[in-house]
Image (cartoon, grey):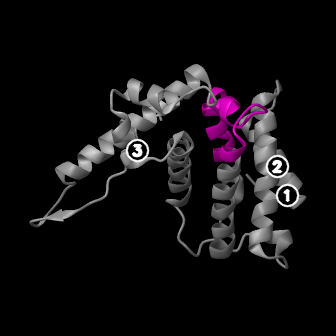
Amino acid sequence: MSRSGQFLPNVSIRQVSVMGTSALTRFERRKQRTRGQLKQAAIEMVREKGYDNITIQDITNRADLGRATFYLYYKDKEEIVWEAIRDEWDRVDRDLNKDYSPYQTFDEYPGLVASFQQAAAQRDLYKIMFGSSGSAALIRRMEAYLAAEVEREIKQRHILGLFSNLPPVLVAQFIIGAGVRLMVWWIETPNEYSVEKMASMLYEMIHHAKPLN
């Protein structure tokens, strides 16, 4: 993501061994570039016209690609916009987890801070996508994605705390249900709460204790 908060094409590299060297094939690089062009075009059009008003033709015109090319990769605009958003949350998750071993106790407060930072960086876009006039389908995708991540962390890193006697799947649904709703309120409603203050208050509501950070 650029400093301006604009989405950039996804450029995660998958290594492929070719004749003893590691590199992407020309075909794979072309597919990666094409997907990146389409996702960037989709996000740009959402910013300009709003999610409900954009069409596949708008996206392909902006990307300077044909409709047939679009349908090689995506079935509809919901899928492409969600993939662009998910790419950014995958990056946030990778950054958070790179310093933790799979068995290390995970402090979720930094994760809450990172989540609100991501929402702040994309505030204008998220107002369109997830606000009161946004897409219910995309909100459900966001909640399902984040709940799955929280459930995984609970199971791997034992962060249940007060909820130790409850099923992880229910705890994850509860935390994300509250967290996403609070995040949407924060980006839609004029207020003076900082990223850190929002993360701290959400942590305290969940755990009935202030974060240690």
**Amino acid carrying mark 2 in the image:** Leu
Q: Residue at x 72, y 37 (%)?
A: 195
Residues at discs 1 and 2 in contact (Cβ within 8 Å): yes
Residue 134 to residue 147: above or below: above
Going from the N terminus, do you reach mark 1 or mark 3 first? 3
User: Horizontal placement of 194 versus 80: left or right?
Assistant: right
Q: What is the residue that sits farthest to the front in this orientation?
A: 68
The image position of residue 144, as x and y in percent, is 67, 57
- Name the residue tied to disc 1: 206
Whether residue 167 appears in magenta in the rendering, the answer is no
Picture quarter containing residue 109? bottom right
User: Residue 93: horizontal and vertical position, in percent?
Assistant: 55, 54
With 70 as the anchor, is 15 left or right in this view?
A: left
Which disc is residue 190 wearing? none
Instruction: Tell me the mark number nearer the camera, choosing from 1 and 3.
Output: 3
Per the rendered image, the range of residues in magenta is 113-138
Q: Secondary structure at mark 3?
A: helix
Secondary structure beneath label 2: helix
Give the residue pinned by disc 3. 71
Distance in Å between CA atoms under marks 1 and 2: 6 Å
Q: Residues within 10 Å of mark 2 (few under 14, many from 20)?
A: many
Q: Secondary structure at mark 1?
A: helix
Horizontally, residue 182 falls left or right of residue 71, namely right
Q: Residue at x 78, y 49 (%)?
A: 179
Q: Is residue 25 left or right of residue 7?
A: left
- For the residue carrying disc 3, how many other residues have a C-alpha within 10 Å: few (<14), some (14-19), or many (20+)? few
**Identity, as a three-letter code, of the amino acid under mark 3:** Tyr
Residue named by callout 2: 202
